[in-house]
Image (tube, rainbow, N blue to C red):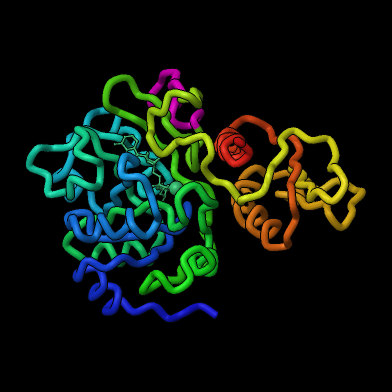
């Protein structure tokens, strides 16, 4: 059952540098006051996240973001089209910013976004600071797309989980670096093609698995904890088999991402299905080819990392 969330309690926790889980349209986040060293350190500790991996800061107003970083014409164009929404910008941090140095490990840049979820927008309106929030999973594991996923990840270690229903997109935000030549550091909820259309130029997608541009883009991220075999035509014995769309013939170990082959639906279902198969105690998963365009680029990125040994 969904808990009735109390803005009063949420404010109390956040104002006291506590960490809570919040819903967003992409995935659930583990949120704390981005201006507080204490809160930000707690986030890293809870997630067991390496310190070199910086966090995304969440805002609800452009005027607030401008206190912390510089914006340019590319930002303005993308902001107008996609915000609030699943797009994260890497921008230059202002020296006068009050952001905790732990958010971005003293780097000159900071990753920022405007989440599109009514409850989280309301929370941001009721506090006087932005929220640092990584995905609410233990380091390198599957990201949560519901309050119960968060509970499964952290048990009782989180004081408060705000239940905002299932995440509409189900994949993390697209990260675009706007310091220097615009580059997509992580494909995600906004399709690269749409970004190119707005900026009117070809944007490089960072596919170099070895060179870590976005430090969190480690190869072995997003893992359900069991082996995954990509581009499979059929399953091996005892393997769960995920198909992109539902084929006519089906066995009990056959699953699909979207009945009618809709890429958005597939993206939304991906983490939930991987989590389910792990909980069903399958020892391994095979997965059929996913079209590599639009949201499919983000899905394939996550699968590649999830399958990395
Ligand atoms: O959809 C999302 O973006 C979710 C929700 C909760 O907003 N958050 C999320 O956060 O996915 P996280 O921490 O799981 O991933 C953040 C990514 C990491 O890969 C990190 O390395 C990158 O953002 N990042 C953060 N700051 C950066 C910076 N200054 N430069 C380059 N990459 C950065
Ligand atoms: Mg994450």
Q: Is residue 229 left or right of residue 65?
A: right
Total numbered circles: 0
User: Residue 106: horizontal and vertical position, in percent?
Assistant: 19, 38
**Magenta segment range?**
192-205
The image shows residue 143, relative to residue 177, as above or below, that is below
User: Residue 1: horizontal and vertical position, in percent?
Assistant: 55, 80
Q: Is residue 284 left or right of residue 96?
A: right
Q: Tell me the residue at 78%/50% (across/down).
A: 240
- Of 269 and 82, the residue lying toward us: 269
Quadrant of residue 105 within the rendered picture = top left
Answer whether residue 164 is visible to the viewer in this image.
yes
Magenta span has 258? no
Answer whether residue 126 is visible to the viewer in this image.
no
Q: Tell me the residue at 31%/65% (across/down).
A: 19
- Of 242 and 139, the residue lying toward us: 139
Q: Which residue is the extreme one toward the left?
A: 96
Q: Tell me the residue at 85%/39% (across/down).
A: 234
User: Residue 168: horizontal and vertical position, in percent?
Assistant: 53, 56
The image shows residue 174, relative to residue 39, as above or below, that is above
On-image quarter of the C terminus: top right
The image shows residue 195, relative to residue 271, as above or below, that is above
The image shows residue 84, relative to residue 281, as above or below, that is above
Q: Tell me the residue at 19%/33% (across/down).
A: 108
Magenta span has 201? yes
Quadrant of residue 185 within the rendered picture = top left
User: Residue 183: horizontal and vertical position, in percent?
Assistant: 39, 25
């Amino acid at each position: 059952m969904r808990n009735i969330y109390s803005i009063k309690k949420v404010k109390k926790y956040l104002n006291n540098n506590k960490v809570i889980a919040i819903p967003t349209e992409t995935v659930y986040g583990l949120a704390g006051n981005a201006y507080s060293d204490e809160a930000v350190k707690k986030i890293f500790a809870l997630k067991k996240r390496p310190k070199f991996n910086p966090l995304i800061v969440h805002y609800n107003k452009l005027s607030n973001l401008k206190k912390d970083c510089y914006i340019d014409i590319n930002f303005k164009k993308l902001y107008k089209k996609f915000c609030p929404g699943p797009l994260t910008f890497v921008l230059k941090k202002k020296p006068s910013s009050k952001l905790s140095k732990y958010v971005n490990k003293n780097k000159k840049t900071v990753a920022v976004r405007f989440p599109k979820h009514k409850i989280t927008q309301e929370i941001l309106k009721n506090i006087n600071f932005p929220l640092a929030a990584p995905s609410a999973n233990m380091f390198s594991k599957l990201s949560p797309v519901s309050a119960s996923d968060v509970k499964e990840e952290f048990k009782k270690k989180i004081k408060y989980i705000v239940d905002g229903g299932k995440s509409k997109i189900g994949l993390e935000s697209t990260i675009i670096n706007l310091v220097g030549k615009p580059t997509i550091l992580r494909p995600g909820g906004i399709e690269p093609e749409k970004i190119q259309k707005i900026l009117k130029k070809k944007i490089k997608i960072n596919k170099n698995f070895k060179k870590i541009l976005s430090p969190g883009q480690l190869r072995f991220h997003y893992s359900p904890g069991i082996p995954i075999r990509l581009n499979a035509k059929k399953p091996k014995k005892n393997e769960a088999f995920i198909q992109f769309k539902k084929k006519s013939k089906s066995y009990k170990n056959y699953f699909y991402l979207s009945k009618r082959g809709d890429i958005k639906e597939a993206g939304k279902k991906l983490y939930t299905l991987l989590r389910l198969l792990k909980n069903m105690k399958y020892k391994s998963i095979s997965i059929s080819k996913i079209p590599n365009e639009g949201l499919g680029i983000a899905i394939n990125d996550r699968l590649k990392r999830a399958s990395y040994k």
